Amino acid sequence: MATLIEIQKKLLPDLIEIMQKRYLILKYIKSMQPVGRRNLSISLGLTERVLRSEVEFLKDQNLIQMASIGMSLTKEGNDILESLENVMSEVTGINTLEEQLKKQMGISKVIIVHGDSDQSPLVKHELGKACATCMKKRLKEDNIIAVTGGSTIAAVAELLSPELGVKRPLFVPARGGIGQDVNNQANTISAIMARKTNSQHKVFYVPDQVSIGIYDSFIKEPLIHEMLCLIKSANIVLHGIGDALKMAKRRNTSKEDIERIMRGNAVGEAFGYYFNEDGEIVHKVQTIGLQLADLQNVDDVIAVAGGASKAKAIRAYMKQAPASTILITDEGAARNLVKG
């Protein structure tokens, strides 16, 4: 028997479109509040004229309130938005898409947030929220959580809350330092996660990328060996998935290695491994930290990556990902992933 939403899609398609638009307006106001109409129109990609009429409607329904500093949601608006979450997942087909990708990739779970992080930075915020919720559901007493670097994982860190600290997690960097941006390094992110959750963390002050000779020497050092054992005993691993060439440049990779990566048609990167579209490893960086093989022993591997432009990188990595992987992504990437 057809659901009410399926019937509405057939008989009242305009109603569904209007509901989607108003849902997004409420969602963006909540993320940006207090927000002015001009900034909101830019973020949503709507003209101020169109937005004005929608805002007036939402105000008349007591879902938003206006002040000199900008618009914000009322309590009723918050309640409506929470009630709409599951409904909109069905309306937009996200629930079906999640199941389709889960089976296609052979992984534990897929979580999709609305929007495309290539188009709006607020979607990255939603990815962070989804990841924080996912971690909260899976966290057990005294878990070790290993985290990689990157801007997406940094966004997750900012959205963790003190309630996670009740189970006494220990945050550790999954690898050493990388590149020049300290804010997006694994050490910094694990420290922020610990601070946000009132938990403990460990630092790992070694280079991310080293020569084989230095690697062999480093891992024999007792303190480094002890830290590596701790990292490899993680119950949860939280990581991003990078675009191959962007990651190579961020690592200050040599010209010869970049040419090797390009010749191998690499599209994605994770844990220092570069993958082509078939999921084959075409290049590997000698890194100190978690290796791809280590993930097979981890209870929950949470991969966070979004944006339509990341679809190829995600697809490539997922062909190597362990079955315990949970992918958290956005509509932009997800709809491109099912096309492949």
Image (cartoon, rainbow, N blue to C red):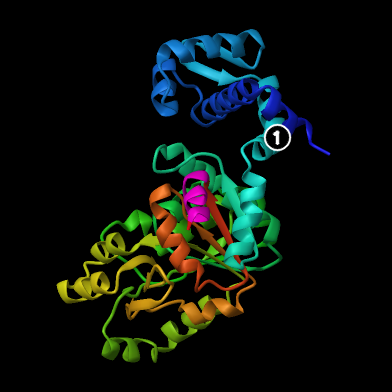
Q: Nearer the viewer, residue 319 or 85?
A: 319
Residue 144 position within the rendered picture, expressed as x and y whole percent measured from the top left: 59, 69
Residue 83 position within the rendered picture, expressed as x and y whole percent measured from the top left: 72, 31
The residue furthest right is 1
Q: Nearer the viewer, residue 288 or 77?
A: 77
Q: Nearer the viewer, residue 40 or 217?
A: 40
Query: Against 267, is 157 above or below?
Result: above
Residue shown at 44%/58% (left/top)?
189
Residue shown at 63%/70% (left/top)?
324
For residue 77: magenta? no
Residue 216 position within the rendered picture, expressed as x and y whole percent measured from the top left: 34, 91
Query: Against 106, is 246 above or below?
Result: above
The residue furthest left is 255
Residue that carries the numbered disc 1 in the rendered image: 87
**Based on the displayed image, in which of its 4 quarters is residue 150 positioned?**
bottom left
**Based on the displayed image, in which of its 4 quarters is residue 65 positioned?**
top right
Query: Magenta span: helix, strand or loop, mainly?
Result: helix
Residue shown at 57%/73% (left/top)?
322
Looking at the image, residue 124 sits to the left or right of residue 207; the answer is: right
Circle 1 — which element? helix
For residue 338: magenta? yes
Q: Amino acid at mark 1?
A: Val
